[in-house]
Image: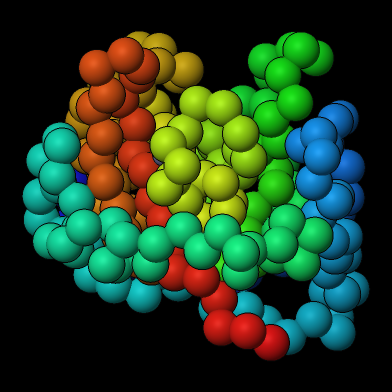
Amino acid sequence: MSFPLSRAESRRFAIAAAAAIPLVLLHGCGRQPSDEPPPESVESEPATDAPAVDLSPVRDFPEKFPRRTHLPDMREAEASGAVSNSMFSAGRDLVYVEDDRVWWESDNDGEDDDECDHSMNKAIVLPFRRLVELCAASNATLRVQECYRPSGIHSTLSLHKEGRALDLTCPMLDPDNPNPEKPTLKSLEILAKLAWAAGFDWVYFEVPRNSGPHIHASVRRADPD
Ligand SMILES: [Zn+2]
């Protein structure tokens, strides 16, 4: 598929989004992050009663998204807001998200790791759902490599500590990619464009020195209820 999308393709995405079954938000990673209260359990309403959520893209697809660049052209802390520390509460701000069209790293990396990639900040769920629809419309499996991680590998300023950032790949977006588990740079460029269209506040085509390339996408804090 070529990007940006043709009008017909955009329409197909819109139809797919409108027909989408709401994500069921259920409680229960194998293990919850250690000393944090468990995320809130939310179950979707029955389909007949649930208000239709429009999961169509909310921005145009950028023509290019080169590696090691980000949109918008400003620092993440300006676009998505800095880590709030005292204002963040795992029990209040995180929800457990399930979607069987998505591959979740924490479901596949053994019992020794207490990471739970299903735990997401409420503020990131809607753009994530839009992105799931966009990838599914291309018959490609979105892979969540990382979301909420309260301790460990990330810097103290990382939005992963509040579940406001996702690390994503989607190798099958590149039709020439022979390996459905390993992203090509082409697949990542397409994914970056989709993530931007899906409405994340900051999207970065990240090529780290010590780990695999991926798309890091983050959002601003939700307004207080
Ligand atoms: Zn990240």
Q: Is residue 139 shown above or below 224?
A: above
Judge by depth and name the residue closer to the eye, 39 or 167: 39
The reply, left or right, for residue 201 in relation to residue 19 is left
The reply, left or right, for residue 46 in relation to residue 149 is right
Q: Is residue 150 shown above or below 200?
A: above
Q: Position of residue 116 (x, y in %)?
A: 71, 35
Does residue 142 appear anywhere in the picture? yes
Q: Residue at the spot x=69%, y=30% of the render?
A: 115
Q: Position of residue 119 (x, y in %)?
A: 70, 47
Split into 4 quadrants, where in the image is the C terminus? bottom right
Q: In the picture, residue 4 is in which quadrant?
A: bottom left
Split into 4 quadrants, where in the image is the N terminus? top left
Q: Is residue 49 shown above or below 171?
A: below
Q: Residue at the spot x=38%, y=67% of the render?
A: 81
| Rendering quadrant holding ligand 1 | top left
Q: Position of residue 17 (x, y in %)?
A: 53, 67
Q: In the picture, residue 219 is in which quadrant?
A: bottom left
Q: Position of residue 109 (x, y in %)?
A: 67, 15
The reply, left or right, for residue 3 in relation to residue 136 is left
Q: Is residue 142 shown above or below 109?
A: below
Judge by depth and name the residue closer to the eye, 217 or 76: 76
The reply, left or right, for residue 124 in relation to residue 199 is right
Does residue 9 appear anywhere in the picture? no
